[in-house]
Image (cartoon, grey):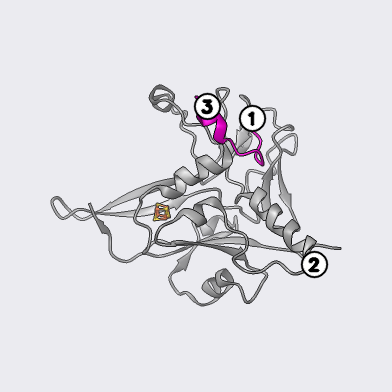
Amino acid sequence: MELPTRKWTMAIDLDKCTGCGACVIACHAENNVPIHTAFQISQGRAMHWMHIERYWDGKYPEVGAHFLPLLCQQCSRAPCEPVCPVYAAVRSPRENLNLQIYNRCVGTRYCQNNDPYKVRFFNFFDPQFDAPLTEQLNPDVTVRTAGVMEKCTFCVQRIRRAEEKALVEGRALRDGEVVPACVQTCPPAALIFGDLNDPNSQVASIVATDSRQFRLLDNLGTEPSVYYLKGGKSHVV
Ligand code: SF4
């Protein structure tokens, strides 16, 4: 059976995001992303497939904050792809996903340099998971070693699992059936994920009708698959 062509897309409502960081923790737990030490971070080696950008608003003491969850934008014209000399950063045309083939990566980091969003991370160290964290590593996700580049995959393992389940049950994949870890965890449901090629999906409806939408650095022509919905009021801190 031929699988349908998809355009996996995420919408992020900045009005709902409170900057709690639950999505970041969920991403670490789901994707076996190591937690780096304070020393490693001080050396510029932080590793978060997803992180929260903060923007301050107003003057003390009336200071508010805007939060923007930042992850791989899964661009349709990804600048990281053509610069990889070994095709480790490649496009999945059927799913419009920007894949990272770990066992091809030779660590030139050209992709990271050509990434305008700075959401690709290089493994400078072999990952350390202190016990009992070793017991909770996700068996569906490779634990990467030093020397390779990594980044958000839209939880491709969850996409695969949902597609295989629908295939076995002989039915089409339903909207909302694929739930990346960050989407599952967000308390105010600020993140919405789905297939833009499905005109009845929630994400397609948001992209078609919500006037607050914008894409990061859209003028570069990268065609990101992440749409942000502009927030209004800042959050009081
Ligand atoms: S979990 Fe939701 S509310 Fe919290 S930081 Fe992430 S997107 Fe924002």
Q: Main secondary structure of the magenta part?
A: loop
Q: Nearer the viewer, mark 3 or mark 1?
A: 3
Q: Residues within 10 Å of mark 1 (few under 14, many from 20)?
A: many
Quadrant the N terminus occupies: bottom right
Q: CA distance from mark 3 to mark 2?
A: 39 Å
Q: Is residue 67 left or right of residue 106?
A: left
Residue 83 rendering spot, x and y as whole percentages: 68, 39
User: Sequence-wise, which precedes: disc 3 or disc 2?
Assistant: 3
Give the labeled residue for mark 3.
129
Whether pointer 3 and pointer 1 mark residues with C-beta atoms closer than 8 Å, the reply is no
Q: Amino acid at mark 3?
A: Phe
Q: Amino acid at mark 1?
A: Val
Which residue is the extreme one toward the right?
1
User: Sequence-wise, which precedes: disc 3 or disc 1?
Assistant: 3
Give the labeled residue for mark 1.
148
Would residue 118 be visible to someone looking at this image? Answer: no
Q: Amino acid at mark 2?
A: Gly
